[in-house]
Every structure is written in structure tokens, then in C-alpha cells.
Image (tube, rainbow, N blue to C red):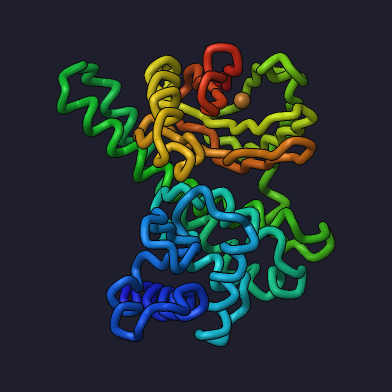
Amino acid sequence: MKLIHYALCMGALAIAAKYCHAQSASETVHHAHAPSVSGSAVDAPTVNPLRDAGVAQADRSAALAAIAKGSSISIAAATLEQIEACDACLARNDLASILAAQPAADLKALAPTLVSKANESAKDASKDASKDASKDASKDASKDASKDASKDATNKSTSRFVKAACIRAIFALPESDRPAQASAWKPRMLKTTTVPGKMAWDPKEFTVASNAIVAIEMINPDSMQHNLLVCSPGSLSEIGVAADKLGEGAVGKQREYVPDSQKVLEIMGLTAPNTTGVLWFIAPAKPGTYPLVCTYPGHWRMMNGKLKVQ
Ligand SMILES: [Cu+2]
């Protein structure tokens, strides 16, 4: 933990030095935990390139490169540290993409760590699954119980997220370079395409096994941006209404229209026209129908689908 904090502080300082040219040293330290990408503008919202949405991938990569340089480690290793420290932050899928895009030699060097973290997280996930099972036994819809459930969902999604990011990075390696353990992982590769002008996905429904390793690719030939979120069962309209509200203020753009809710389980961020978004995740342990939704304001009523977990 101390190490992570040290790395974070050093990293943040390095980023601050890079991005906050105008600030004095003492101010830089003061703002170290939330360096601003845009730097000098007084009213610009403070954005942390390692945690927040609304950050260009190039800025994230630059921040990670600064940390790697400061700690004399590879960008892959620095990115993995940030993924672990991310704790379900909005940048998590972007960080996972950056990790997977690192040179094969660096990923290969990191592979033993990636494999051990993937396995470590799997243990956590099964612990959570048994917790879920015992909770089902006493099906009590009291407020406290549901609060506990969503707290569990957050913990689970954090460790599952680290596991998914590690597995994704291993699968970014050529098959011949993957560690032997990877042959036991059978990712479900799902693909969907946005239908231009229709605010829809084709296909929009998928069925996966509980705890499966899932990769969704979203091809976006549409002329507008779309994202793709996996949410808790029954939460579609709650998340959709919250997303529309985000469309009314500046904070919405900064969050890339992802509502601040524990019912948002997985996030593929905004995917630009004529690009492809990718999201790797571990399917929920609990069988059920999990809404898929695009939370770009105004889209959710039409642009939604289902992830059926069996
Ligand atoms: Cu959309």
C-alpha cells in the first residue's frame, strides 16, 4: 500500500511537473493528487489523467510514461500499478486498453505478475460469490441489505476489473508468447455494431456463463459517439434518467456521461465515430439479466440491450 501511495505521489508530481508549468513548486505539491491537464485556465475543471473520464488517451499515456520514467519501470508495469490503485475509477477501461497496447516484450516480462494477479483476483471473486449465495438465502429487501449488496458489487467489480485487465493484457500477446496458464482461460469474444442513425446495436442481446471472461467489441460506423455500460439488473431507467441529467451540466461531459452509481458495473467509454471500443470484464457471478446501455444523453431509451448471465 505504501509503495502504491509512493508511486502515486511520485507519479502525480511528475505529471504535475509536466502539465502545470505555470504553478510554483509549493502549489504543485498542493495539487499533486489532482493535476490539471489543461494547466493554466483558472476555471477549467481539475482532471486527473490517471483516474478521470474525459481525458485523451494520449494524455493518459503521457502521465503513465512520466510515472514509469520516474520509477524506472516499464510503462506496462506503471499502468498495472495504476489499474490496481484505480478502485473502480472512470479511467479503468482506458488504463486496461493502454496496458494491452504495450510492446509484447514488456507484457511478456510482466506476464508472471499478470497471471498471479489474475488468479489472486479469481479467489476474491469466488469469495464474493459465496457471500452473494448466503445473502440470497436470507432474501431480505431491507434498505441495509441492498446497501450491503451494492457495496459488495463495488468490491467485486474492483478485483474483477484487475483480473480482467490482466487477462486482456495476456491475450494481447501472440499465442506463442502467452504463459501456459492462459490456455485455461476461454474468453467469450462478443461483437456488436452500432446501426448508423438508429441509436441501436446489432446484435443487442448476449448470453454468457456466470464468471465467464467476456470481451465485447463495439464497432461504431455511426456519425456520433456511443458508450456501452453493463448495469445491475433492473437499473436501466434509473441509470438512463441519471445519464440524461448529466447531459445538462459540465460535469456530465467530464464524466463522459457515466452516472456516479454503484449500479454501473462495467464501462466502455465513449467511442468515436468510425472507431471500435473494447471492454473486457468478468461476467457477474449472479445469474440474471444485466442491462447494456449507452448513456450518451438521450440515447438510453433506444440504445439498450441485455447481457443474460446464466
Ligand atoms: Cu449512444
The residue lying toward the viewer, choosing from 222 and 89, is 222
Residue 225, position as x, y percentages in the image: 65, 33
Quadrant of the image occupied by residue 176: bottom right
Image quarter of the C terminus: top right
Q: Is 249 rendered above or below residue 55?
A: above
Q: Which residue corresponds to the image point at 29% horizontal and 83% vertical from the top-left?
A: 26
Determine the image quadrant of residue 213: top right
- Quarter of the figure with the N terminus: bottom left
Quadrant observed for ligand 1 in the rendered image: top right
Position of 297 relative to 36 (above/below): above
Q: Where residue 186 appears, x then y in whole percent?
A: 70, 42
**Position in image of residue 175 (x %, y %):** 82, 57
Q: Residue at x 77, y 20 (%)?
A: 196
Question: Can residue 241 be seen from the camera position used here?
Answer: yes
**Nearest the camera: 160 or 198?**
198
Judging depth in this view, the residue of 257 and 87 nearest the camera is: 257
Q: Position of residue 15 (x, y in %)?
A: 48, 74
